[in-house]
Amino acid sequence: MKKNTVDLLKDLENTEDFGTYFDENKDEFLSVELSDYLNGLLQQRGLKKIDVIKRAELSQIYGYQIFSGIRRPGKYKMICIALAIGLDLEETQKLLKACGFVPLYPKNCEDSVYIYSIHCRFTVSQMNALLEHYGYGEVCRS
């Protein structure tokens, strides 16, 4: 039986032993292989890895390591990949959550730049220029 997040949180708050909680709920935890998730997105959209890697402005080696599951990028590299794939904000938030990252938050100025960039379908270069303009520098370089 699948529990919702509220029920899991209640169970966690009421447990006296994390081991018991873990054993009773291990089937409830997210278990997403990033490489499978990303490759599924590519397949759905008919995109090639090399094209996404170039648009994300990642080195080929690093990009292929991400798509093969060898490397796990940080949150902001994932945003670059999301832009390169052409994900909208909802899809990007879902990707970030699936990877265990905190979703973008519009009250955070830097996150607002990312949200705006996604909404406007910016390239990584355009996003980096906006980041730099507001003092955040280019974080999406490998």
Image (cartoon, rainbow, N blue to C red):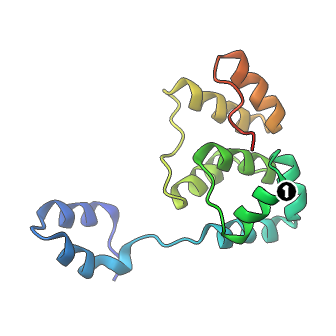
Q: Quadrant of the N terminus?
A: bottom left
Q: Horizontally, is 20 left or right of 106 in the view?
A: left
Question: Does residue 80 lie above or below 40 as drawn?
Answer: above
**Going by the picture, which residue comes out furthest to the front?**
61
Q: Position of residue 43 (x, y in %)?
A: 81, 71
Picture quadrant of residue 98: bottom right
Q: Nearer the viewer, residue 122 or 136?
A: 136
Of the residues shown, which amino acid type is indicated by label 1? Gln
Q: Under tag 1, what secondary structure?
A: helix
Picture quadrant of residue 42: bottom right
Residue at image point 57% right, 32% down: 111
Q: Position of residue 2 (x, y in %)?
A: 36, 77
Q: Which residue bears the numbered disc 1?
A: 60
Question: Does residue 104 lie above or below 44 as drawn?
Answer: above
Q: Quadrant of the C terminus?
A: top right
Q: Position of residue 52 (x, y in %)?
A: 84, 55
Residue at image point 80% right, 48% down: 58
